Amino acid sequence: MASSRAPRLSHAQYETTIQDLLGLDAPANITQSFVGDSTSSVFANNGGELVVNGDLWADYQRAAEALAEKATASPEALARLLQGASTTDPSAFVERVGRRTFRRPLTSAEVDTYVALFAKGAALFPQSKAFDAGARVVLEALLQSPHFLYRLELEERGLTAYELASRLSYALWQTMPDAELLAAAESGALAGDGYTSQVRRLLDSERTRDTARAFHSQLLQVFRYADVTRATTLFPEFSPELRTSMAEETQRFTDDVFASGGDLVQLLTAPYTFVDARLAKVYGVTAPGSGFSKVTFTDGKRGGVLTQVGFLAANSSSTEPDAIHRGTFVNFRILCSQLTPPPVVAPPLPADDPNNPQTLRTRITAFSGPGTCGAGCHSKLINPAGFAFEHYDALGRWRDQEKALPVDATGEYDFEGAVRTYDGAVEFGRAAAEAHMTHRCYAKQWTEFLFGRGSAPEDQALTRRVGLASLEQHLPLRAVMEALVTSAPFKTRPVDP
């Protein structure tokens, strides 16, 4: 199984862990100044690619010093760190805080080491009370330890109960195990039905909804909405604030599908969304009085997350829709189609001839359709998927004509031997939602996110099984998550050779 014995906490996981460990009311936002996370994966939590270089190590040191000072600056802060417990015993402090920081009990040797360090605190911070100074220096050291910064899985024969608890908590909550989950690991209650009970308890939490939101935001690249810009002379509905509305719409929609027990079919086909006054202008619907309201489309022109303004605008140029980028996105992230890498230097699309105006689809087909060098991936996979969205312009507005020429959004796509024809994105989304490959792809994307690593050949049986269940049983999105984190590959790790 392709997994790391020492996946590093992503910056998002570091923030939530610090907030829970120190008992803060809000994130510390201390990672904003860190060297950024960088992975080649769809998701930012790929522990196999998250490394620590010299600059990030210095960031961790500075953060540990600042956070330890804050957490020991007052009796109230110390009480939050100790979860309400009161102690003046260095050993008790080390054991209690160390257990939560390392997400497992400390060994006796570790306790002795940190107690000895505790005794040096008074000399290092003479301005503080001796106990506060000792607590501060110990917390500084704990926060710089690999046992905190990494989710170490060192057991030679699989996972310990504590390692499994951490794996589960960081999958569903993106943070450290809470007191109940740690207690279950300590008592042996993570075996059998006890594990399933903990999974469902975590799934019931608002934190899992936050995780689902983060998953869909990264899958759909919602961060790219912030880069959308349009000239108001061509798109009077555009404003910088519209970009924020786009992201809010996608998040509200995916939140609603998850919370309502919806499935992947609903995610790809539901004829409703959430709009504010700015988005209402783009969609041509009645604006809500204030804030966001749910609207249902009755004209058959919209359905699912891929017909929302954010996706359509982010995958367009500043003046024209971009069928190639829209099609590539759908193939990579929604269908998991196998596309060959593009050429290092791709020739530009020929400019339109003002004396002989053509639709963008016609120009793309002549450039990369059948009988051209793009007859493989482009004409069979990328172009057919992208052309389904031709009714939406560069801002995501509906259009029936382009340059006084009728828009053609018809096509056919081979869903692994099942060729489906369609006219427009709504029909394409419905065809995709009825294909096993789409559900298998969705399970694959969740596997990478929940497992915190890239996909591996050994995952194929799992994603095939969960994808088939998603299709045939209309598994709610929550049930897809449950199926993956209760699977044997998630709960175990192979014995090293």
Image: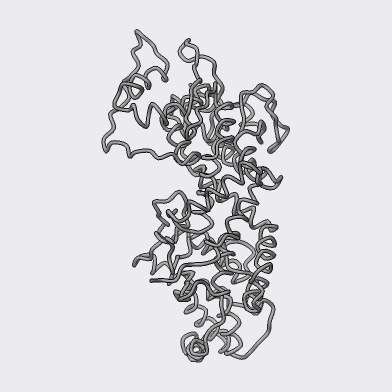
The N terminus: image quadrant: bottom left
Q: Residue at x 61, y 27 (%)?
A: 302
The residue sitting at the left extreme is: 345
Q: Position of residue 134 (x, y in %)?
A: 53, 86
Point out residue 439 in the picture as x, y percentages from the top left corner. Answer: 56, 42
- Nearest the camera: 235 or 483? 483
Spot the residue most to the top. Answer: 355
Question: Which residue does the image show at 71% across and 32% down from the upper left?
Answer: 288
Q: Nearer the viewer, residue 152 or 122?
A: 152
Query: In the figure, is residue 141 to the left or right of 100?
Result: left
Q: Quadrant of residue 345?
A: top left
Report the residue at 52% width, 35% height from top: 311
Task: Tell me the quadrant of the picture where the C terminus can be found.
Answer: bottom left
Residue 283: percent from the left, percent from the top?
A: 61, 26
Relative depth, front residue between 289 and 466: 466
Q: Can see residue 233? A: no
In the displayed structure, would residue 432 be above or below residue 353?
below
